[in-house]
Image: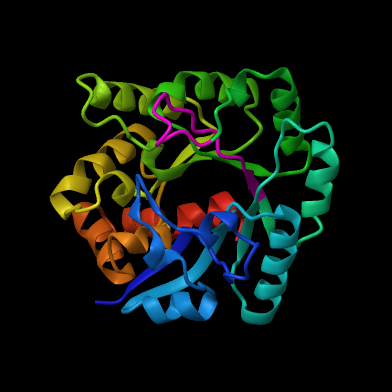
């Protein structure tokens, strides 16, 4: 059965050497062997992978490009030529003294809707992305304050132990819409307190009216996932944030390492098969449209 979706978390890349340094020399990491995703992934490729999924709109999230501003300009050109992506979430280091100028430059792209700056910090270097507690830095907070002035949202990517601090930031800036990436990236699954830390952090973030959640990226820490293994995370996200502030997303082509596109979306639908037609529309389409203004 055809399933209509608005996919609020995809990446496009052209694999031109130097554009995406992390893809030029793929290896083993917590994702496993990343080589299968290190191929060109453009709108036509996404459509070819879609199977019986009817992709209505997509949101491009920064792909850790060597030159983020060039990436934004390229994506806008791609959108003008192909119709995708419908929205762009770019990368800006909000701790930079020239963050305001950087934001202004990105805002020249008509499809720009938000900013993502990855914040994941972890004592295990395998999982550590940035090695800095940006949310504790006054300079970064000053940069974050600029988002509301520019009418931009923030894609929040971090780990559960960082959620209490993120909730403080969200409360400090209630006028900035925030969406938590990848269901909060529950990484420490073997730790005795892991589930509780993740669940409590999710509910703390959900208590902030300006925070939403993407149910996505579940394969990153569950490479052989099943509907039964992802269902508790989907339900917990929806229980915490409500159907009004939750949205499913593919994280393709990263999650292509663990599933094909149609299988993933149908698994999401099966995981929440008890919802009403209106609730399904919210979770799979309209919440993403509303958040990203597309």
The answer to whether 47 is drawn above or below residue 29 in the figure is: below
Q: Is residue 252 visible?
A: no
Relative to 88, is 279 on the left or the right? left
**Location of residue 152 by image quarter:** top right
On whether residue 115 falls in the magenta region, the answer is yes
The answer to whether 195 is drawn above or below residue 16 in the figure is: above
Report the residue at 31% width, 48% height from top. 218
The answer to whether 230 is drawn above or below residue 15 in the figure is: above
Secondary structure mostly seen in magenta is loop
**Residue 135 appears at what percent x and percent y?**
60, 23
Quadrant where the C terminus sits is bottom right
Q: How is the image coloured?
A: rainbow
Report the residue at 35% width, 50% height from top. 31
Relative to 134, is 46 on the left or the right? left
Range of magenta residues? 114-129
Quadrant where the N terminus sits is bottom left
**Location of residue 141 by image quarter:** top right
User: Closest to the observer: 241 or 112?
Assistant: 112
Q: How many marks?
A: 0
């Amino acid at each position: 059965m055809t399933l209509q979706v608005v996919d609020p978390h995809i990446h496009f890349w052209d694999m031109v050497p130097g554009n995406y340094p992390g893809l030029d020399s793929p290896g083993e990491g917590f994702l496993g062997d990343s080589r299968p995703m290190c191929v060109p992934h453009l709108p036509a490729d996404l459509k070819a992978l879609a199977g019986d999924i009817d992709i209505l709109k997509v949101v491009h999230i920064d792909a850790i490009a060597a030159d983020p501003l060039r990436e934004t300009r390229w994506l806008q050109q791609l959108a003008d030529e192909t119709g995708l992506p419908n929205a762009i979430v770019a990368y800006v280091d909000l701790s930079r003294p020239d963050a305001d100028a950087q934001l202004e430059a990105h805002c020249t792209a008509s499809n720009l809707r938000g900013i993502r700056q990855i914040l994941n910090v972890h004592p295990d270097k395998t999982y550590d992305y940035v090695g800095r507690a940006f949310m504790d830095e006054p300079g970064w907070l000053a940069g974050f304050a600029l988002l509301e002035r520019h009418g931009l949202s923030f894609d929040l990517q971090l780990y559960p132990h960082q959620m209490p601090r993120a909730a403080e930031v969200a409360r400090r800036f209630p006028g900035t819409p925030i969406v938590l990436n990848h269901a909060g990236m529950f990484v420490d699954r073997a730790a005795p307190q892991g589930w509780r830390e993740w669940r409590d952090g999710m509910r703390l973030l959900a208590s902030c009216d300006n925070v939403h959640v993407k149910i996505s990226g579940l394969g990153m820490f569950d490479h052989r996932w099943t509907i039964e293994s992802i269902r508790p995370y989907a339900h917990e996200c929806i229980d915490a944030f409500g159907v009004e502030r939750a949205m499913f997303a593919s994280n393709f082509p990263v999650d292509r390492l663990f599933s094909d596109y149609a299988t993933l979306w149908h698994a999401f639908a099966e995981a929440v098969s008890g919802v009403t037609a209106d609730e399904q529309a919210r979770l799979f389409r309209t919440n993403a449209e509303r958040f990203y203004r597309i």
